[in-house]
Image (cartoon, grey):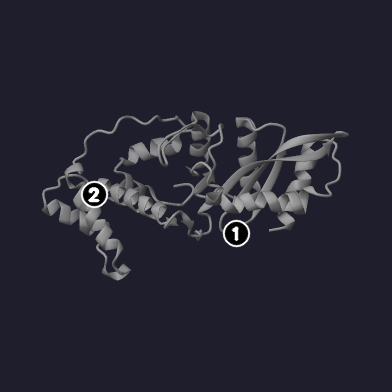
Amino acid sequence: HYRDRIPIREIERRTGLSRNTIRKYLRSNTVEVKFKVPERPSRLDPFADRLSDWLRVEAGKGRKGRRTVLQIHADLVALGYDGSYARVAAFARRWQARREAAQQTTGRGVFVPLVFQPGEAFQFDWSEDWATVGGKRIKLQAAHTKLSHSRAFVVRAYKLQTHEMLFDALTEAFRVLGGVPRRGIFDNMRTAVDRIGAGKMRQVNARFAAMASHYLFEATFCNPASGWEKGQVEKNVQDARRQIWQGMPPFADLPALNAWLEARCIERW
C-alpha cells in the first residue's frame, strides 16, 4: 500500500483479508515476526495437478490467447472446486515464481542474464578492505548495495559485520538511493540465514526478517557457491577496490570516511 500505492480494495481482493484487518496492519507501528506454521489441507489440493497443467499450457500461449486467473478459477468451480479466487491466484503466483526461478539456468547451469525493471531489486554483499583511520591502517568491512536496474551503488565501511552494521548499511543505502526496491538479493550470511535447507529453503534470522518486513522488501538468497546469482554486486566489489579504495586519503574517523565514500559512489552513477 505504502510502497506500490496499491489501494486497500485491491489488497483485499489479492489476499482475502478483510479491510479492517488490512487497516489494522497499516496502522501498526511495530512489525511482529511471524513463524511459519505447518500447512493445513486446502480445498485446492485435489485440483493442484490439474491447475499446474493448465498454467503450463497457458504459459505457452501468446498473451492475448491466455485465460486469465479469473477464468481459470471459474473453470475450476465448474469442476467442483468451492474455494476462493484468492487461493487460486496465490497458487498461480507461486507457480509463476518457481517457473521463473527454473528459467534462470538452462542445461548444466549456464547462466541466463536477468533483466530487471526499475525498482525491482537490489543486491548486497560484504568485502574486506583497508584504510587509514585515526592515524592507523585498519581492516574494514565494506557493505556494497547496488540497484539491479540502474546499477547505482553505495559503499559504506564498518569495523564488524554485525546485525547493527548490516541494518545501518541498508538504511543509509536506501537514503542515498532514494527508496527501497521490492526485492533484495543476498548470499547466505550468518546475520540473515540461520540454516540452509534443501534447494531455496532457508531458516531466516528473526532480526533480519523483522528488518526486511519493516522496509517492505522480499529477501531472496543465492545458492551456496553461486556468486553469479548476484554478479552485479560481486563485480562492484572489484570495481570499488580499483576505482575508490586505491589512492584513498587518510581520515580522522569512520564518519569522515563514509561521507567521502558516499560522494565517490554518487560521482560514478
32 is higher (above) or lower (below) than 173? above
Q: Position of residue 173 (x, y in %)?
A: 64, 45
Is 29 or 64 nearer to us in this picture? 64
At label 2, which amino acid type do we have?
Tyr
Residue, far right: 135
Q: State the mark number for residue 85.
A: 2
Question: Is there a contact, CB below 8 Å, between mark 2 and mark 1?
Answer: no
Residue 68 appears in the picture as rendered: no
- The total of numbered circles placed on residues is 2
> SS at mark 2?
helix
Mark 1 lies on residue: 150
Is 77 or 45 nearer to us in this picture? 45
At label 1, which amino acid type do we have?
Ser
State left or right for residue 138 relative to residue 238: right
Which residue does the image show at 21% across and 59% down from the upper left? 71
Q: Position of residue 87 (x, y in %)?
A: 26, 45
Mark 2 crowd level (few <14, some 14–19, many ≥20, 10 Å Cα): many
State left or right for residue 218 relative to residue 176: left
Quadrant of image for the C terminus: bottom right
Q: Position of residue 92 (x, y in %)?
A: 30, 51
Which residue does the image show at 58% across and 52% down from the upper left? 231
Residue 57 appears in the picture as rendered: yes
269 is higher (above) or lower (below) than 65? above
State left or right for residue 28 relative to residue 260: left
Alpha carbon distance from label 2 to label 1: 36 Å
Is 193 or 173 nearer to us in this picture? 193
Of tags 2 and 1, which is closer to the observer? 1
Is 213 or 188 nearer to us in this picture? 188
